[in-house]
């Protein structure tokens, strides 16, 4: 069964450092997403990406965040200068349509900022 | 007002019980609706889509009432393996692109 894969599974970084979270979406999917979940809280939308550009982003996705699809398979989330409050589980997801279809989630990267 | 609101939980039920989850959403422009399941420290996984006509998948039944902006999930004959957090998810289309909005989830604990 095709799946979304994320690396690393756990990343610990010092405050102020840059981190890049990596995702390989399902190969025939065209729409890509990042979500985050702070421990004990709900899953929150960060950004959606289609046709090599951001299609939607939330208020959380400020100038410290960026996304990129550097090649045909990877989809990355970069946080330029991490803050303690960026500590969360980050989920990548992909879907084959931007409309009503299911989004498949990766297993997540747990980011801990110390 | 919270965009997607669910019963706070947790629900503690014995095996074999029937349990119902409720969810309301605030944006009447929401287009599609889902129940996801999330195990502890794992990713959300789609349990089922929710349609206005109601839909059933084995022991699981989902209902949608667009007029009331209300979604429900019924689990019959609950199993130990049903223990998880159930997430009500609403898909809002903006300019043709979907944005999934999640409720906080309701935890279900099924005991022997």
Image (cartoon, grey):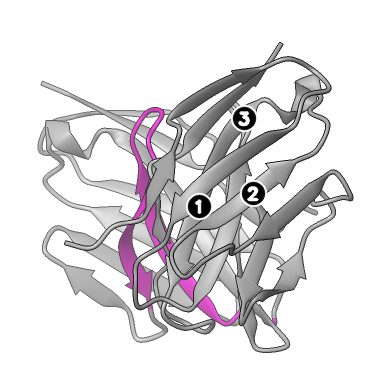
User: Do badges 3 and 1 share one subunit?
Assistant: yes
Name the foreground residue: B96 vs A96: A96
Number of other residues with Cα within 10 Å of mark 1, as a class: few under 14, some 14 to 19, many 20 or more: many
* Residue at the disc numbered 2: A77
- Distance, label 1 to label 2, CA atoms, is 9 Å
- Disc 3 is placed on an element classified as strand
Q: Report x, y in % for residue B48.
A: 31, 66
Query: In the figure, residue A82 lies in which quadrant?
Result: top right
Relative to residue B66, is residue A89 depicted above or below?
above
* Left or right for A75, reference B41: right
User: Which region of the structure is painted magenta?
Assistant: B29-50
Query: In the figure, residue B59 lies in which quadrant?
Result: bottom left
Dominant secondary structure, magenta: strand
* Left or right for B79, reference A97: left
Q: Is residue B31 magenta?
A: yes
- Residues at discs 1 and 2 in contact (Cβ within 8 Å): yes
């Amino acid at each position: 069964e095709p799946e979304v894969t994320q690396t690393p599974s756990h990343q610990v970084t010092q405050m102020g450092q840059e981190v890049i979270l990596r995702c390989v979406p399902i190969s025939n999917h065209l729409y890509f997403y990042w979500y985050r979940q702070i421990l004990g809280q709900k899953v929150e939308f960060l950004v959606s990406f289609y046709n090599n550009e951001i299609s939607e982003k939330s208020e959380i996705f400020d100038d410290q965040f960026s996304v990129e699809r550097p090649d045909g398979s990877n989809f990355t989330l970069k946080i330029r200068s991490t803050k303690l409050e960026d500590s969360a589980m980050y989920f990548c997801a992909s879907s084959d349509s931007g409309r009503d279809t299911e989004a498949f989630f990766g297993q997540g990267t747990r980011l801990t900022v110390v | 007002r919270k965009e997607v609101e669910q019963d706070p939980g947790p629900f503690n039920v014995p095996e074999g019980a029937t349990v119902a989850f409720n969810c309301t959403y605030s944006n009447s422009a929401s287009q599609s609706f889902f129940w996801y399941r999330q195990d502890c420290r794992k990713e959300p996984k789609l349990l089922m889509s929710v349609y206005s006509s109601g839909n059933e998948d084995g022991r699981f039944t989902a209902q949608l009432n667009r007029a009331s902006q209300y979604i429900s999930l019924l689990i019959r004959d609950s199993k130990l393996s049903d223990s998880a957090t159930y997430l009500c998810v609403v898909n809002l289309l903006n300019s043709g692109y979907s944005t999934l909005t999640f409720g906080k989830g309701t935890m279900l604990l099924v005991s022997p």
